[in-house]
Image: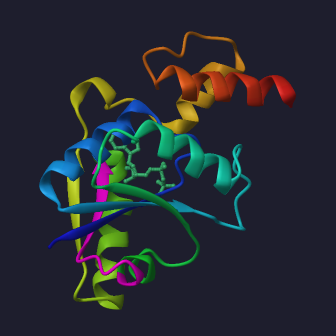
Amino acid sequence: MVVAVYPGSFDPATYGHLDIIRRASISFDKVVVGVLHNSAKTPLFSVEERVNILEKAVIDIPNVVVKPFEGLSVNFARENHAQVIVRGLRAVTDFEYELQMAQTNRVLAPDVDTVFLTTSLEYAYLSSTIMKEVALFGGDLSRFAPEEITDALKQKIRKR
Ligand code: ADP
C-alpha cells in the first residue's frame, strides 16, 4: 500500500490544490493532506478552519484524509507511514524552491520520496495569495475555488 502526504498551507485551498489531491488519489492508495500550522506565519484562516474547508471539499474522495500538522513534512510523512510527499509544480518559479525542499527532505529522510504533479494548465496561474488579493478587491472568485470556499473567504474578509 503506497501512502502519500500532500503538505501545504492551503490558506485557503483552490481548484489548483483540489486538482492535485484528486489526481494524487488516483495514483496512490491513500493521500493524507497535511495542513501546516506554522507559528512564524499569520494565515488568514486558522489551521482548524483550513482543515474543515478541505475536508468538505474532498468528502467525495474516499482515500483522502485531511490532518493538521506542525514541523517537518518528512516527520509528518513518517507519522502517517507515507513513502511519498506530493507537491504541485506550477511554473519554473516554483521549481528552484521545490527542488531545494525535495533535496533537503531526501537528506533528512532517504526513505521518503518527493513526487511532483504538474499543475493542470487551467490552474497554472492560481495560488491562494492571488485568490485572496482578488477577493480583497471584490473580484469574481468563481474560477478559483468551489463556492463553499469562496463564500468562506468573502465572509472572512468582511469580518476583518
Ligand atoms: P506552501 O506554503 O507549502 O507552498 P501552498 O498551500 O501554497 O503551500 O501549496 C501547497 C502545494 O500545492 C505546493 O506544492 C504548491 O506548489 C501546490 N500548488 C499551489 N497552487 C497550485 C496550483 N494552482 N496548481 C498546482 N499546484 C499548486
Q: Is residue 76 above or below residue 128?
A: below
Residue 88 on the magenta span? yes
Query: Residue 16 falls in which quadrant of the image?
Result: top left
The colour mode here is rainbow
Residue 64 on the magenta span? no
Task: Give the side of residue 49 with respect to residue 157, left or right.
Answer: left
Residue at 65% x, 66% y is: 38
Residue at 74% x, 54% y is: 42
Query: Residue 143 falls in which quadrant of the image?
Result: top left
The part of the chain drawn in magenta is: 78-89
Task: Give the side of residue 80 with respect to residue 141, left or right.
Answer: left
Residue 70 horizontal/vertical position (percent): 59, 73
Residue at 44% x, 83% y is: 75
- Nearer to me, 121 or 68: 68
Residue 3 horizontal/vertical position (percent): 24, 70
Residue 144 seen in the current view: yes
Q: Quadrant of the N terminus?
A: bottom left
Q: Is residue 133 above or below residue 100?
A: above
Q: How many marks?
A: 0
Q: Is residue 23 above or below residue 63?
A: above
Residue lying farthest to the right in this orientation: 160
Residue 106 horizontal/vertical position (percent): 28, 83
